[in-house]
Amino acid sequence: MTTAKFTRGNRVSTVLARKLGGELLRLRDEASLTQPQAAAALSATAAKVAKMERGWVPFRDPDIRILCELYGVTDPKVVERLLSLAKTDRERRKAKGWWNQYPELRSLVEYVALEEIATGVRTWQGAFIPGLLQTPDYARALAVGNADWDDPDEIERFVEAKVARQARLTDDKPISLWAVVGEGALRQLVGGREVMRVQLARLVEASRLPNVKLQVVPFLSGSHPGMTSAFSVVSFAEPGAMDVVYMDTTSSTLWLESEADAARHNATFERIARNGLALRDSVALIERIRKEL
């Protein structure tokens, strides 16, 4: 469990680099080799290998190929997955994206940057509408309710940034979004009745997009695995290949970066989704709640 990004001097430890470094460390351990032995194969120092395994430096493709050969990795799919992960991390480090203009995003900056290059997001939210589906007024009301802002102008910039994120749903290579939302999030009057009516209409509209799958977990479903926490699983390739788990708490932003964590949360997400209504029934419930307002 780690925070989203670490810095040390001019070096940055990113989510993707730590994930790749962790996989290479696991492969080295399975091969019963030491850091000095890996360093010798790379004609480098053990300190460099340590930095690689901790995600402090970007990875070169030749280094990955040499280490895979040294560690006895013969499956070309495994090698290509590691190379793809390294390429994605390098692109992420070089990117000068729009999100860098918004310091108001705070701990969300790393998540938004990854969302920009992700192929898919699975998100479970029991208390509020997921950010990719929020209207400006709803996002503003959430921010005001959070009461963590010194300057009202910061809230407007924050809302502007959150709305900008939503372009990923309709761009040339739209992100695939599977959102499961608790019924309580639909009934909580964030911003008042009119704000919620517009917000619920936005959910119905978004559900018609071919890349959006929206489900509601109704109150009547009873106890389910998602009652203790909300989370998102971010994917960068085929499902399960490079997934990382994002969790935002009141005190910190957390990333779970191991294959085991990703697999566990994907399984939990699917169990939560099984407690949800079918897609058509979910939209019907949203429209019914909207009419009640």
Image (cartoon, grey):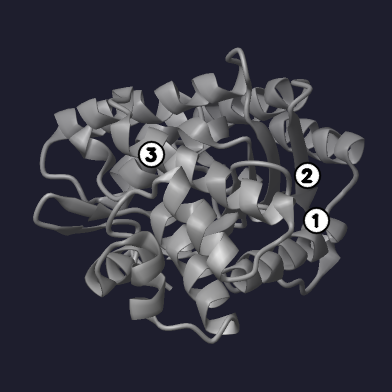
Q: Locate residue 202, reporting x and y percent.
A: 63, 24
User: Which residue is found at the position 70% from the left and 20% from the top?
Assistant: 205
Dot 3 lies on which element? helix
Residue picked out by circle 3: 90
Residue picked out by circle 1: 273
Instruction: Tell me: residue 17, above or below residue 120.
Output: below
Dot 1 lies on which element? helix
Mark drawn on residue 24:
none
* Labels 1 & 2 near each other (Cβ < 8 A): yes
Q: Locate residue 94, reporting x and y percent.
A: 30, 32
Instruction: Say which of 34 and 182 sits in front.
Output: 34
Q: Residue furthest bottom?
A: 32
How far apart marks 2 and 3 lie (CA) works out to: 35 Å
User: Which residue is found at the position 47% from the left and 39% from the top?
Assistant: 87
Mark drawn on residue 215:
2
How far apart marks 3 and 1 lie (CA) works out to: 34 Å
